[in-house]
Image (cartoon, rainbow, N blue to C red):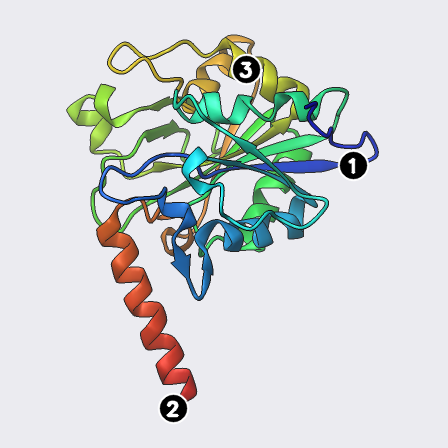
Amino acid sequence: MPHSRVPRSSTAVAIILAARPSPNAARPLPAQPIGGRPMLHHVMDAAAGVFGRAILVIGPEMADLPPPPPPHRTVVQRDRRGAAHAALLAAPMLAGFRGDAAVIRGDLPSLSAACLQALRDARRDGADLALLAFRPASPAPLARVLACADTGQVDRVVPWAEATAAERAIGLCDAGVLCARSVDLVRWLRAIRPDEARGELRLTGIVAAAREEGRQVIAIEGPAAELTPLDTPEALIEAQALDRLSRHLSAA
């Protein structure tokens, strides 16, 4: 069955990645509830406020998830080959589309429309590739962003597993949220090669692809409270407990 394409009249679209499996959970964490709704639906709401349309990339074990309302679409990643591979599954829907496209990880339920708007504004202001970065409250095994402190221009994004001790000491972390022209985004995603350790297509590789073309890559620093992922069952349980406490206090 052919994919439904994003209309050429649209100005932007967001690809939300929610297929990454969790080894200690029956379903990917973005499908787990926060505030009575799947985590990724909170992300979709924020994304829709800035980019209009969303394409959700989910896993096959999420088939019972209620489909998003139009104009949003869903695609299933059956072969788990990394975040860049997941984002590429949306490429058929972007054929002929010339607007901006964002890629957003689906385990950021606190992500705000204001934060995403800052990302899109950076793209509109001339960045070929704009990405969100943050400084976590405590050291985390996330990719490090090597960027100019004054201009935000990014030299490299280094996955944690490949980072040196000095690079791991850098406080600025990649949030897994980025924006580019759709035609550039798809081309750079296709240029990413599998990593040697696991054979996955890492989303961080898009920065190297853009830099190889001499393109400008800009990092926008956002709040850790919005950009710290709920990527472990423990983090999810803590967030759910805080959400229940907040609702209890609000009702009191």
Tell me where residue 144 appears, x and y as whole percent: 31, 30
Name the residue carrying label 1. Answer: 10
Q: Residue at x 56, y 9 (%)?
A: 213
Name the residue carrying label 3. Answer: 188
Tell me where residue 153 appears, x and y as whole percent: 48, 27
Mark 3, Cα crowd under 10 Å, few <14 / some 14-19 / many 20+, is many
Closest to the observer: 87 or 170?
A: 87
Q: Is residue 9 left or right of residue 219?
A: right
Q: For the residues marked 2 and 1, what is the alpha-carbon distance in whole angstroms?
A: 44 Å
Q: Residue at x 63, y 31 (%)?
A: 101
In this view, the residue farthest toward the left is 165
Which is closer to the viewer, label 3 or label 2?
A: 2
Mark 1 residue type: Ser
Using the image, determine if residue 101 lies above or below residue 81. Answer: below
Q: For the residues marked 3 and 2, what is the alpha-carbon distance in whole angstroms?
A: 51 Å
Secondary element at tag 3: helix
Mark 1, Cα crowd under 10 Å, few <14 / some 14-19 / many 20+, is some
**Tag 2–tag 1 contact (CB < 8 Å):** no
Q: For the residues marked 1 and 3, what is the alpha-carbon distance in whole angstroms?
A: 21 Å
Name the residue carrying label 2. Answer: 252
Is residue 125 in sight in this rendering? no
Closest to the observer: 234 or 210?
A: 234
What is the total number of numbered labels drawn onto the structure image?
3
Picture quadrant of residue 3: top right
